[in-house]
Image (spheres, rainbow, N blue to C red):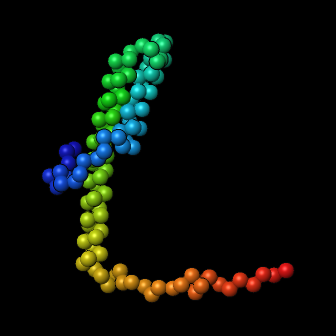
Amino acid sequence: MGLPDEAKALPPPGIINRNSVWLGVIGWCSAMLQNAINRRPPMKSGVHRQALLASIGWFIGYHVTKHENYTYARLDRDMNEYVRLHPENFSDKEKKTFAEIVEPFHPIR
């Protein structure tokens, strides 16, 4: 599921991003859950496995973010191209002031 060559023109995502953090935490929690299921101390045993699963989750999250950035950039490019080719569908509307939009206020007592 590699990205196409046009995705290489995009800037790389930050090393700390939403998907990496979430999937890293999920990897770490899955190692602790496995320790708890096997009746081992969750935080103290298998620290190497905790680090391994957290870093695998971080790696997968980084690549998910790269794919997400490419997908949204492609959609933005296609949408802007459509707007450029069909300007009649996206004409500017007349500007109204706030006073023209809001109805007059008459308090009833």
Q: Residue at x 68, y 86 (%)?
A: 104
Query: In the figure, 59 relative to 43: above or below?
Result: below
Judged left or right of residue 76, residue 96 is right
x%, y% of residue 78? 26, 66
Find residue 23 and report its image quarter: top left
Instruction: Give the residue at the far left of this rendering.
Output: 5
- In which quadrant of the rendered image does the N terminus lie? top left
Q: Residue at x 42, y 13 (%)?
A: 45
Q: Nearer the viewer, residue 98 or 72?
A: 98
Judge whether residue 37 can be spotted in this image: no
Q: Residue at x 35, y 80 (%)?
A: 90
x%, y% of residue 69? 29, 52
Judged left or right of residue 39, residue 59 is left
Count how many numbered circles sit on residues in the image: 0
Q: Residue at x 39, y 84 (%)?
A: 92
Query: In the figure, 88 relative to 56: above or below?
Result: below
Judge whether residue 46 can be spotted in this image: yes
Q: Nearer the viewer, residue 40 or 102?
A: 102
Judged left or right of residue 63, residue 26 is right
x%, y% of residue 107? 78, 81
Judged left or right of residue 102, residue 17 is left
- In which quadrant of the rendered image does the C terminus lie? bottom right
